[in-house]
Structures are given as structure tokens and as C-alpha cells.
Image: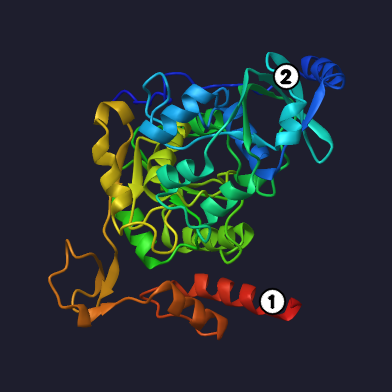
Amino acid sequence: MKRFEISPHGGRLVDRVIKDAEEKEYLMKSAEHLKKLKIGEKHLSDLEMIATGAFSPLDGFMTKKDYESVIEDMRLHSGLVWTLPITLDVSNDVAMGIQENTVAALTFNQKIVGTMQIEEKYTYNKEKEAQLVYHTKDKEHPGVRNLYNQGNVYIGGKITMLDTPKHNFSKYFYTPEQMRALFKEKNWSRIVGFQTRNPIHRAHEYIQKCALETMDGLLIHPIVGWTKKDDIPADVRIKCYEKLIEHYFPKDKVVLAAFPTYMRYAGPREAVFHALVRKNYGCTHMIIGRDHAGVGNYYGTYEAQEIFNEFEVVELIIIPMMFENAFYCKKCSSMATKKTCAHDEKFHVSLSGTKVREMLRAGEKPPKEIMRPEVSEILINYIKNANEKK
């Protein structure tokens, strides 16, 4: 059977990374004479995601027409579905020294990492963006808090990346082009992606394996950029994924890869965003579970699934695979959801995230029906070491 390969979002995989050594050296020297524009860690992540094609069809930070169209209609100005603003913010003082229709050097930690053709600078309404994107203006929401703390002016324009960041998880780092090549090498056509910022527990494992039953392969793609302070660090989560794959997954059906972006905690909009980005990596399907990319009680339990009804399948092409909350049923003697289990809740083994964290902090392993013992052990050791360092 001929192998199928899904097209990138917008039809073309963007590539704005300078790879030729001589060209890079020339552009680096030229950039020394340009106006310098400092960027932060999150901007650096966005720069890399744009440059490597993960955020295709974007080839730069959004100009005003794309930004306004995205926050109001969840589409780029062209009409293509896109749900989150990808923007570069600066303070009023910095904006005053920036001229439109010029080229600036982007610096991170006083080192030139890229250049930007500054097409436009524009002000925006933070409360409007907060309400439309995050569905709340509450500063306790981590995404809203970040938004309110950033600069008041956005700078839009095409970027070029001259120096790609060094990754802590280089073993697991793939650009979309490299990931697609790997899928081709494995001869996978139907690939399901799984987005995560937490250690994988039994409910996650269950829905991954359910999805894998009809797929050629599974991409476990954890975010390794910024997350909330109380989230488990990326290096610990990676160890959990490694252990789970080692003992409980067929090695030839799973790829573990680091996703070097950060969490927005934008719930429904971020669920669509995660799907579109995984489409650029070559996935044909995307697992969307309970409260995908949610935080606190800001979103409905299955709102992140319901948002997909607002788009035509042909607009997204990547297919969302919807799963309900999973649990272990003592009567069924297996993992299940309300769709597949007919038994009373008294037979269900299910603990809240808060309760699981309390047990781990106390050095207790949650029931094996909730979390694999090997994963529990890694998390208990991490918490123990973290407490000893305090």
C-alpha cells in the first residue's frame, strides 16, 4: 500500500533557519551593525518554532491584521484556521526606538540569534486578548498573568534564525522536517500525537493504547519549555516517559520527542493549536482528552473537544480523537471510560491530582491502577530530593 503523508498546515513547511555555514557567518557579521532587539525565553521558543516550521504557515511574528483576525475569529487574515496569537511584545520605550520597514537583530542573553524584518508595530488591548483567548480576565490564570506582565506594543514581521538554541533534550529533539523523515523511515502513514505537560499515568496510557490500536504509530510529544511552577520539571517527566515506554509499550510503535515550546494554558484554543502544530510534525490524528491544556476551573471538562465542532474537517485535515476521562473498574478488571463501562462508580478506582500529589509527597505509591509503580518511584525520589534541597 502506498504510504500517505499529511501536508503541513497551509500546504508548505516553513524553513527560516540558516544552515549554510558561510551564509550564517556573513549574516551574523552583518547583524552586528543592526539595531538590537532583546527577546526573552518564550520569544526564543516562538522564534525557533516559526523558523523550523512547527508553526507553519507563520514565517514571522504576527502583524496587526493577522493578530486581530486570530483573537477574534480564530483564523489568520487569509482565512486559514489558527487559534493562538504568536506575537513579539516590547515596552513603550523600546517601541519608540524601533522603525518600521527596517531590519533588527534579535538577541538572547546578549547573543544574536536571528533577525527580523520589522513590518509593523501596534498597540493592543490586553483585556480583550485575555477574554477572547483565555476566556477570562482573571490574573490568577497563568496565561493571563503572563499577558498582563508583558509589553504594551507588538512588533510584527518575518524572521530568520541564525543560531538555534542548545536543548537539554537533544536526544529527543526533532524538527518537523526530521520528524517527517523518521515517520517515512518507519513507513508510518497513520500517526497519532499525544500532547502532555504531566507525567503519564494509567489513564493517559490507556487512551494512548486505545488510539494506537488503529494507528501505525504513536508520537508522545511532551512540552519541555516553560510551565507553571507547580508542574513537574521536564527532565523528571522525560524519565517517566522513558520508563513507561521501556516496560509497557511496543518499542517499534512509539516515538518519544521533546516539544520545545511553552504552555499557554489556553484550554480549547490551545487544543486546536496543539493539533495543527502536530500536523506540521506529520501526525494525522491527535488525542484530545479531558480538559486539554486547561488549568484550574476556567474551562468546561470537554470544552477542548467541543471547539473542534466550529471547524470543517477539511480545514483542519488532522483528525481529533476524543476520549472521556478514564479510570480503572474493579468489576471490569480493566481500564475503561463511561462509554465502555456499565458499572457503578463505587467500582471505579480514581484519585484526584491533588490526592495523588499528597501521596507522592508522603512517599506513598498511588494504587497501581492509577499510576505504574515505576513512574511513582521516579516522582517520589524527585519530590524527596527537592525537599532535601530546600
Q: Which mark is residue 385?
A: 1
- Sequence-wise, the earlier of marks 1 and 2 is 2
**Mark 1: amino acid:** Asn
| Residue for badge 2 | 99
Q: Which of the image's four quarters has the C terminus?
A: bottom right
Residue 159 as seen in the image, left or right of residue 178: right
Which element type, helix, strand or loop, lies under badge 1? helix
Q: Nearer the viewer, mark 1 or mark 2?
A: 2
Vertical placement of residue 101 versus 259, above or below: above
**Apparent side of residue 371 relative to residue 95 in the rendered image (left or right):** left
Vertical comparison of 30 with 132: above or below: above
Residue at image location 53% in from the left, 57% down from the top: 139
Residue 103, how many percent across, how many down? 73, 17
- Which residue is at the front of the view, 133 or 169? 133
Question: What residue do we see at 66% from left, 40% from top?
Answer: 151
- The reply to whether residue 214 is in sight is no
Front-most of 108 and 337?
108
Split into 4 quadrants, where in the image is the N terminus? top left
Residue 254 is situated, as x and y percent measured from the top left of the image, at: 44, 48
Query: Tell me, what colour scheme is on the image?
Result: rainbow
Q: Nearer the viewer, residue 277 or 144?
A: 144
Q: Quadrant of residue 210?
A: bottom left
Local packing at callout 1 (Cα closer than 10 Å; few below 14, some 14-19, many 20+) is few
**Picture disc at residue 53:** none
Which amino acid type is shown beneath numbered disc 2? Gln
